[in-house]
Image (cartoon, coloured by chain):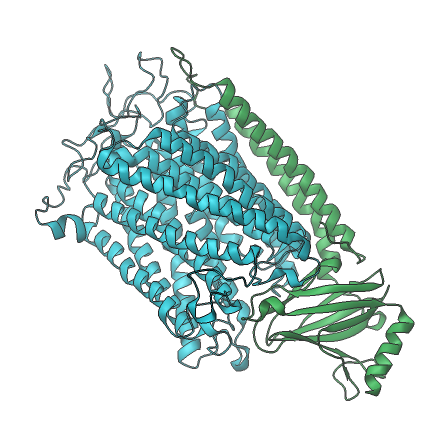
Chain colours: A cyan, B green
């Protein structure tokens, strides 16, 4: 799209008047910034719950069936097997659907998109409000499942039928499983509302001069993520409804007794959930790219290859789902095609990694808390990506499938990758969100502790996986071949406790900085993108006047000026939004 | 992999693991090494300015083609092992064919009787959770599930296959070493999932026949 059409509503959308009442301003707000912060707080709250569940899982894996003081009152403090698989199920479900997806798309997407494209709000502010408020019943329904008879769903976050379809197969397969389905239906609806809004806003509401290839990578990533959400989520929604019908209405979509097929669920589920892995990593890749370029004080290396690799990941992401099903009973011939497409999807990720390295090469690197976390993203994503190659290799996957190798791999991608990306984004945009700076010293201590203990918890999982330790076992050590692994598991559990406690530093820093942090300038990091062109925090309608964009987002160290940054909206002699030549190689 | 391999195709899996470990190990050392080097070499110094470079077409092509070809090569290379393990079953005439049914939370093996065929009246139902096979003979397992999904994992054989209700699935192996090995369920199947444990006994052919005769007599 050229810059002409991009200007349609940049100024025309005056949006809505600033609300005056408390309810309209902070609770039922249509302001994308408030909605973003609402998503941020709720997903951080759920991160604590998900983290606490992880601690219980780790406790069980270190000392199976030992009393946990203060927990599980009905069984004398002992985590029974049904409780263990419920913990595993809820940890995965909460971390994926209530933490990583909403914090990346919901919090950062909402807060950043209008600011970074130079718009006064989202295209559909009211729909945006609904997209948050439909999450609230989803939260409540999922939490309510902890208190119903039989407890929460316990069929794994993947909820494979028949286990999840037949109420008498596992205690949590009663009411808890129904609530799980209902909650995810609500989450999916919220995601769709958000996706439509993000796509429309990015396509139609960019400021004058902000052509698509001047967009920062955070916006590119959120844009393509929204397309993934739009195309993949309806498939999950359909599958959930079919499962609900199987459970309550006597249908047999996934039940063999009436001619159904349990493997059908796996196809439908992974058709959504594999793209969902990219929904959970692409925005973090975008954030990482922006943070690295800003603090290396250097233009992003290979901007267009970076954009194209996001597109390639998203496109290929739709044809690799079968790699979750190599041993499921799916035709082995299909296994070959899914193995090949999966090997190929490693390529755009490799290209991104090389371009991040290229950005650091020749840079002038400032080690802020945000930068440290972005670097950790790259370092950990490499491990997450490379360990995926083993799982993609069908013969090797036969052995490591459903072992802790996979658990390690997914955590290197989603914690080592996504969550470090979230931390980077949090330290980077906190000043813009709240008008105050976070404490850098606490930020670095938090980073160091998190980075070290993260690796101590998750790297050994590859050893466990290569030793054949299956996941989701309430007591692995009754197997002779797994008994020698208990010591290593105890070490991992101690490390996990420190990892969890280290997050208190982040919470403390966050809370303290919210009220006591140093006042933030409009552009404290001397960055180039449009959100830094307005005050911190921005006014209700974001910009006093909508900025005009003259160049791409990564003009650091430009020879045209003395400073080492050149904001997108800064006018230089002779510049116009369309005639400024793009720098070579852009 | 730390579990001893005792199947004819186990080494295929293990050597592929090793090859991928070498390739990814090289990529790991290269990328992480460069990352650390750049972080030290290009750390902030007062008065310095970063290079004003937006990219380089040649290196983009280089670092697209090289990993692309390596990944594609890996993909092609492993199809042989996959074909051997999963795509082509041995002929039933040259193999021992047994049935294993998974149920919450136990494994039920069935052996063919004197007619050598499963699904006939003289089938022999063996005790649960013990699957005995003769050494150095191809075995085809017809795996099925009665209630929910299970997964038949024999680490020492490098065998894992989901058992799916309503859809029997055949797998094969040939064990090369006499002994007793553990079988684990690796698909979450309910609260007893963690104790759905069984044993694979690999026996000398004569011992196997004796065992089978003893069961049949019972």
Outermost residue to the left: A20
Q: Residue at x 24, y 38 (%)?
A: A514
Q: Is residue B33 above or below residue A362?
A: below
Name the image quarter holding residue A504: top left
Q: Of residues A387 and A202, which is closer to you in this image? A: A387
Q: Is residue A65 visible?
A: yes
Q: Of residues A404 and A340, which is closer to you in this image? A: A404
Name the image quarter holding residue A483: bottom right
Please state the horizontal and vertical placement of residue A90, each as a whole percent of the image: 43, 61
Please state the horizontal and vertical placement of residue A551, each as a whole percent of the image: 30, 25
Q: Say whether residue B128 is left or right of residue A337.
A: right
Q: Say whether residue A559 is left or right of residue A573.
A: right
Q: Residue at x 70, y 55 (%)?
A: B82
Q: Say whether residue A126 is left or right of residue A529.
A: left
Q: Is residue B215 above or below residue B45?
A: below
Outermost residue to the bottom: B121
Please state the horizontal and vertical placement of residue A163, each as a whole percent of the image: 51, 72
Total label count?
Answer: 0
Outermost residue to the right: B206
* The C terminus of chain B - image quarter: bottom right
Q: Is residue B59 visible?
A: no
Q: Say whether residue A370 is left or right of residue A59.
A: left
Please state the horizontal and vertical placement of residue A361, each as a whole percent of the image: 49, 22
Q: Is residue A14 above or below residue A251?
A: above
């Amino acid at each position: 799209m050229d810059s002409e059409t991009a200007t349609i509503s940049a100024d025309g959308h005056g949006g809505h008047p600033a609300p005056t009442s408390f309810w309209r301003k902070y609770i039922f707000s249509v302001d994308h910034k408030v909605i973003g912060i609402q998503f941020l707080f709720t997903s951080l709250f759920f991160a604590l719950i998900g983290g606490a569940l992880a601690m219980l899982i780790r406790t069980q894996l270190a000392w199976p069936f030992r009393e946990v003081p203060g927990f599980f009152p009905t069984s004398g403090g002992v985590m029974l097997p049904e409780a263990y698989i419920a913990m595993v199920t809820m940890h995965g479900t909460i971390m994926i659907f209530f933490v990583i997806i909403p914090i990346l798309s919901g919090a950062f997407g909402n807060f950043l998109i209008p600011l970074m494209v130079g718009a006064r709000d989202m295209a559909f502010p009211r729909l945006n409000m609904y997209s948050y408020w439909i999450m609230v019943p989803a939260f409540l329904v999922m939490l309510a499942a902890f208190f119903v008879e039989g407890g929460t769903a316990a069929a794994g976050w993947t909820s494979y039928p028949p286990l999840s379809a037949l109420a008498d197969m596992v205690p949590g397969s009663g009411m808890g499983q129904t609530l799980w389905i209902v909650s995810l239906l609500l989450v999916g609806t919220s995601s769709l509302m958000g996706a439509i809004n993000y796509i429309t806003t990015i396509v139609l509401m960019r400021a004058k001069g902000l052509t698509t290839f001047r967009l920062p990578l955070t916006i590119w990533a959120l844009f393509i993520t929204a397309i993934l959400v739009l195309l993949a989520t309806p498939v999950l929604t359909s599958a959930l409804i079919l499962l609900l019908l199987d459970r309550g209405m006597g249908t047999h979509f996934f039940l063999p007794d009436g001619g159904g097929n349990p493997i059908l669920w796996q196809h439908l589920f992974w058709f959504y959930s594999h793209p969902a892995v990219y929904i959970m990593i692409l925005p973090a890749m975008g954030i990482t790219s922006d943070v690295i370029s800003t603090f290396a004080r250097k233009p992003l290396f290979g901007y267009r290859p970076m954009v194209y690799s996001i597109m390639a990941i998203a496109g290929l992401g739709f044809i690799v789902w079968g790699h979750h099903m190599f041993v499921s009973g799916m035709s082995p011939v299909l296994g070959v095609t899914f193995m090949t497409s999966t090997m190929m999807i490693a390529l755009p990720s490799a290209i991104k990694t090389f371009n991040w390295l290229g950005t650091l090469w020749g840079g002038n690197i400032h080690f802020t808390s945000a930068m440290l976390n972005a670097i950790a993203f790259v370092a950990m994503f490499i491990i997450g990506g490379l360990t995926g190659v083993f799982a993609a290799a069908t013969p090797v996957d036969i052995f490591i499938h459903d072992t802790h190798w996979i658990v390690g791999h997914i955590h290197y991608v989603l914690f080592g990758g996504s969550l470090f990306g979230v931390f980077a984004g949090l330290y980077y945009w906190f000043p813009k969100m709240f008008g105050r700076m976070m404490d850098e010293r606490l930020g670095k201590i938090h980073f160091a502790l998190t980075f070290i203990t993260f690796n101590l918890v998750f790297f050994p999982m590859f050893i466990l996986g290569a030793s054949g330790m299956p996941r989701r076992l309430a007591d692995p050590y009754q197997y002779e071949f797994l008994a020698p692994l208990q010591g290593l598991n105890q070490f991992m559990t101690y490390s996990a406790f420190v990892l969890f406690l280290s997050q208190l530093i982040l919470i403390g820093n966050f809370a303290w900085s919210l009220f006591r942090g140093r006042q933030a300038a409009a552009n404290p990091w001397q960055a180039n993108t449009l959100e830094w062109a307005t005050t911190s925090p921005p006014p209700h309608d974001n910009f006093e006047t909508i900025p005009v964009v003259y160049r791409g987002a990564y003009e650091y160290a430009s020879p045209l000026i003395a400073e080492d940054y050149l904001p997108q909206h800064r006018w230089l002699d002779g510049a116009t939004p369309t005639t400024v030549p793009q720098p070579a190689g852009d | 992999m730390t579990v001893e391999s005792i199947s004819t195709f186990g080494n295929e899996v293990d050597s592929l693991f090793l090859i991928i470990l070498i390739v990814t190990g090289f990529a790991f050392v290269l990328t992480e090494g460069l990352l650390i080097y750049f972080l030290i070499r290009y750390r902030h110094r007062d008065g310095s300015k970063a290079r004003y470079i937006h990219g380089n077409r040649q290196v983009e092509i280089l670092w697209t083609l090289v990993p692309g070809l390596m990944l594609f090569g890996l993909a092609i290379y492993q199809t042989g092992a996959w074909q051997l393990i999963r795509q082509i079953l041995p002929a039933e005439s040259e193999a021992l064919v047994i049935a294993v049914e998974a149920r919450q939370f136990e494994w039920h093996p069935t052996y063919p009787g004197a007619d050598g065929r499963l699904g006939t009246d003289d089938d022999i139902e063996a005790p649960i959770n013990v699957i005995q096979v003769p050494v150095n003979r191809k075995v085809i397992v017809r795996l099925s599930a009665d209630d929910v999904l299970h997964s038949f994992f024999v680490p020492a054989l490098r065998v894992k296959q989901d058992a799916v209700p309503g859809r029997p699935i055949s797998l094969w192996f040939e064990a090369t070493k006499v002994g007793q090995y553990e079988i684990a369920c690796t698909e979450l199947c309910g609260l007893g999932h963690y104790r759905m444990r069984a044993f694979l006994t690999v026996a000398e052919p004569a011992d196997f026949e004796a065992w089978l005769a003893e069961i049949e007599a019972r």
